[in-house]
Amino acid sequence: MAIDEETRNTIISLMQNGLDDHEIGNQLDISPYTVRAVRAHITMGTYGSSPTKSEEYIEAEEIRFGLEKDLQQALRRNIKQLEPGLSIIDNGKEHNTDAGFIDILCKDDADTTVVIELKAGQANDTGIAQTLGYMGALKEEGIEKVRGIIVAADFSRRSKFAVKALPNLKLVRYGFSFVFEDATL
């Protein structure tokens, strides 16, 4: 969904007032992922370039975030496939911390809180920093035993090296398996 310039300007104004992506999305009746795409667009400094490029960029971001949302829903339905013993503790919605929204929050068999971060495409070292930020925010909330799992289609080489130094963070590559059934009447 492409957004018009007026909506984009309203989003920017609300961002300047300190509202987060979910609050802005609720107020404007748009997806928080659209807001996040505009935020990324501004951060990358592409705002103000040709409208066609802006709209294409926002659409591409919405598709990526849509895929992450689909991945999140599928994983929530099949969390034990990620790791036996995991149980979701976030009441079916992203958990809000001072560092941002955790995609899925779980507990494992050892009563350790598990932060699960999802990336639709390739994850890089910023995904690691994001996950570590969530883990640190939970520790600030008084949760002592915390670890993280990043689920992505693939990982940058640098992120694979970084995780070698982080025993409480794991990288997991996802894939798809299709099941077909006849739906003819």
Image: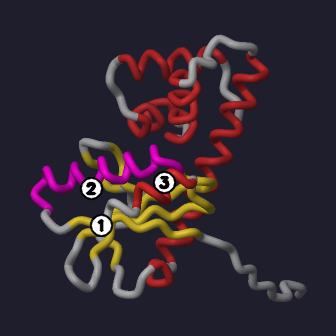
Q: Amino acid at mark 2?
A: Met
- Whether the residues at callouts 1 and 2 have beta carbons within 8 Å, the answer is yes
Residue that numbered label 3 is attached to? 159
Please say if 129 is above or below 157.
above
Q: Disc 3 residue type?
A: Ser
**Residue positioned 40% across, 87% down in the render:** 84
Which quadrant of the structure image shows residue 102?
bottom left
Circle 2: element type: helix
> Is 179 displayed left or right of 70 in the figure?
right
Say the numbered circle drawn on residue 130.
none
**Crowd class of label 2 (few under 14; some 14 to 19; many from 20; radius 10 Å):** many
| Boundaries of the magenta span | 124-143
Mark 3 or mark 1, earlier in chain: 3
Q: CA distance from mark 3 to mark 1?
A: 14 Å
In depth, the one of 168 and 120 nearer the eye is 168
Question: In the rendered image, is residue 156 in sight?
Answer: yes
Name the residue at 75% across, 14% down: 50
